[in-house]
Image (cartoon, grey):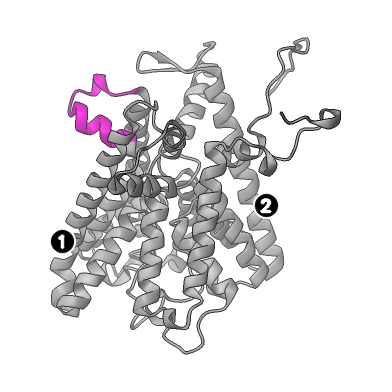
Amino acid sequence: MKLQLGGVTPPFWKRGQTSPARVIILGFLLLILAGALLLMLPISTRAPGGAGFLEALFTATSATCVTGLVVHDTMQYWSEFGQAVILLLIQIGGMGVVTVAVAIFIFSGKRIGLKQRWVMQESISAPQVGGIIRMTGFILRTALAIEALGALLLAVRFCPQFGLWKGLWYAVFHAVSAFCNAGFDLMGSEVPYSSLTAYVADPLVCLTVAGLIIVGGIGFSTWQDVAGNGRRLRQYRLQSKLILLFTVLLLAGGTLYFGLYEFGLPQWEGLDSGERTLAAFFQAVSPRTAGFNSVDLTQMSELGRLVTILLMLTGGSPGSTAGGFKTTTLAVLVLSAWAVFRRRSNAECFGRRLPDAVLRNASAIFSLYLTLFFLGGALICCIDGVPLLDALFESASAIGTVGLSIVGTANLSAPSHLILIFLMYFGRVGGLTMIYAVTAGNLSVSSQYPQESVTVG
């Protein structure tokens, strides 16, 4: 029997119980460190000597956290071995460290205990522990099938252009990168950091990549709802309904803005009407934490950069390959504001009432993301002297795990790179996960202070 002297609670890393939140953040941390060590090997780079620790750490963090920010062009700097390491980190980071670990247990025939199921539930934001192994198998099969289909479609374009084997590698790499919302690309052989700008007028490439981004970003539990209920929308869980509704609204709103205003500005007059429509849709999809771009972002107006920042911060959905503070958080905040305007005591949607705890969690996540977003942007602005809006763009890209950049991440200093590493890591594991990892085990007291109202607004 262990005694605690003086009633002092030991720090979280010394307590006996390991919460799912701690397993998740430690799993991502260990994967990042392992990836950094592999990328430091001389075989990982084209030039002799290998990468430095900070360069390898930044790239491993960006790949594991499926961000896409890079300090070196992926094609020109990293060898085929290094690219394979990056792709493996993207796949594991996108699917979730815990998901992949449980998959290994399943394929090896080992028994999955209740503790592992509990951690798995938290990792993929599943509604319940029951059926979690079956859901994991469904996720893995569906993800691999979608990536294979995406690779097959991209191979139709890349194989004739680059040759059979190189074209297949390009197709697989970009399909996985798009589905996992990573944004890493291999298109810099001629022009570094060019992303998909050479395919701005190519519907096959742009629509395939955009489709992979959307499917990867709506969440694993939403897949299960769609697969199980099809067109019977009334049978969907409330979370799936909100995810699909706000995903459509964000994509439609972004496409309308870029199509009707941004790409109608003089700097885009080189695009015809069809190319503008395709580019508008792609740029509405990509900031949802993917990081590909089919146009030169440095030509974007200030309003366009602000709209992109808002899309990057929102990100994808819970239990998906995407980052950001999530569509459901935005949905809860909007519904709560609408309830206040209608003088209702509770937020309601689709015949359901949202618990107060959900609103508190959404408010905490939103406040935390905004604080770190503004703080990170302000520090980058002060350290490197870049314009504030561009620094905020970089900060939003990191914490939203997007990968788009205006100033060029490679041009920033080492302190700014460390700031971005923290923001990418935080953005991937999630705000509540970080909080729960530190506070797990702290029991709330049953007593309450007297209540007193405060006037707001």
What's the amino acid at mark 1?
A: Leu
- Which x, y percent locates residue 161? 17, 77
Q: Earlier in the sequence, mark 1 or mark 2?
A: 1
Q: Is residue 204 magenta?
A: no
- Cα–Cα gap, marks 1 and 2: 42 Å
Dominant secondary structure, magenta: helix
Residue most extreme to the bottom: 48
SS state under label 2: helix
Q: Is residue 226 magenta?
A: yes
Which of these two is toward me, 128 or 359?
128
Q: Residue 127 has which mark?
A: none
- Which x, y percent locates residue 259? 32, 52
**Do the residues under discs 1 and 2 have CB atoms within 8 angstroms?**
no
Residue drawn at x 20%, y 79% as measured from the top left: 162
What's the amino acid at mark 2?
A: Leu
SS state under label 1: helix
336 left or right, relative to 442 = left
Q: Quadrant of residue 112?
A: top left
**In this figure, which residue is indicated by the disc labeled 2?**
375
* Whether residue 182 is situated above or below residue 267 in the rendered picture: above
Would residue 257 be visible to someone looking at this image? no
Which region of the structure is painted magenta?
221-237
Which of these two is toward me, 216 or 121?
121
Q: Quadrant of residue 22?
A: top right
**In this figure, which residue is indicated by the disc labeled 1?**
152
Q: Quadrant of residue 283?
A: bottom left
> In which quadrant will I find the C terminus?
top right
Depth check, mark 1 against mark 2: the one in front is 1
Residue most extreme to the front: 1
* Whether residue 355 is situated above or below residue 84 in the rendered picture: above
164 left or right, relative to 121 = left
Residue drawn at x 35%, y 53% as measured from the top left: 180
